[in-house]
Image: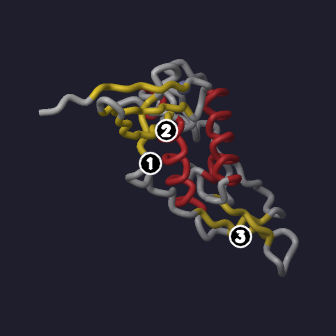
Amino acid sequence: MVYNDEDLRKEVAHRLRRAIHNETFDMLDPIPVQIEHMLGITPLGSVVPQSARDDTILDPHHWFWQAYHDDSVNSTEVENLITDTISWLEEENILQIEEDETTDHYYNVCVDMYPQETTDREQTTCIECGGVADVSHSIEGDAQYMSVYEIVCTECSASGIYNTVLVRR
Ligand SMILES: [Zn+2]
C-alpha cells in the first residue's frame, strides 16, 4: 500500500471532521487555534504540549508517512503538506470556516464528508510521480476493436494514450 496525495486529503479531511466539525473558533481565545487543534491532537482551547506531535500524523515517523509515495519527508515537509492539504480542502469547500454574523470574533466551522469516488471516474497511480492519475476509457472500432485508455496525472504533467487490440474469443 502506497499513499498518495488523494489519500492525504482523505486522511486530513477525516481528522478535521472528527476534531472540529460544528465547533466554534474564538479569535479572542488566548490560545490561538493551531494545526494540532485542527487535527484533533490537542483539544481546542488547550495549550499544545511540546511533545504533542510525537507519533501523530505531524510526525514523519508516523505510519502514514512510512507508506507515503515520497518516502523521505522531514517534519517541515510534513507540516507543509498538511497545511497545503487543509488549504486545498478549504478551497474545495469541504472545510468551511465562516465568521459568525452576530459577533466579530467567532468563526463557525463545518467539515463535510470527503466526497466518495464515483465508479465512472477511474483512477490509477501515476507511473512517473506516484500521484493520482485520471483514466478515461473508450473502445474504438475500425477494422478491429481497440481498447483505448487516456491517462492524465493530476499531480505532474505526465499524460499518455495507451491502447490494446481486442481479440475475439
Ligand atoms: Zn504524475
Q: CA distance from mark 2 to mark 3?
A: 34 Å
What residue do we see at 63% from left, 34% from top? 81
Q: Looking at the picture, which amino acid does disc 1 mark?
A: Arg
Q: Which mark is residue 145?
A: none
CA neighbours of label 2 inside 10 A, class few (<14), some (14 to 19), many (20+): some
For discs 2 and 3, the disc positioned in front in the rendered view: 2
Q: Residue 109 lies in what quarter of the image?
A: bottom right
Q: Which mark is residue 134?
A: 2
Tag count: 3
- On screen, residue 98 versus residue 111, left or right, reads right
Relative image position of residue 97 (x, y in whole percent): 72, 63
Q: Which mark is residue 108?
A: 3
What residue do we see at 84% from left, 81% from top? 102
Element type at mark 3: strand
Relative image position of residue 88 (x, y in whole percent): 66, 47
- On screen, residue 169 versus residue 74, left or right, reads left
Is the residue under label 1 in contact with that under label 2 (CB below 8 Å)?
A: yes
CA neighbours of label 3 inside 10 A, class few (<14), some (14 to 19), many (20+): some
| Nearest to the observer: residue 143 or residue 61 | 143
Mark with earlier residue (2, 1): 1
Relative image position of residue 119 (x, y in whole percent): 38, 52
Mark with earlier residue (3, 1): 3
Element type at mark 2: strand
Q: Looking at the picture, which amino acid does disc 2 mark?
A: Asp
Is the residue under label 3 in contact with that under label 2 (CB below 8 Å)?
A: no
Residue at numbered disc 1: 121
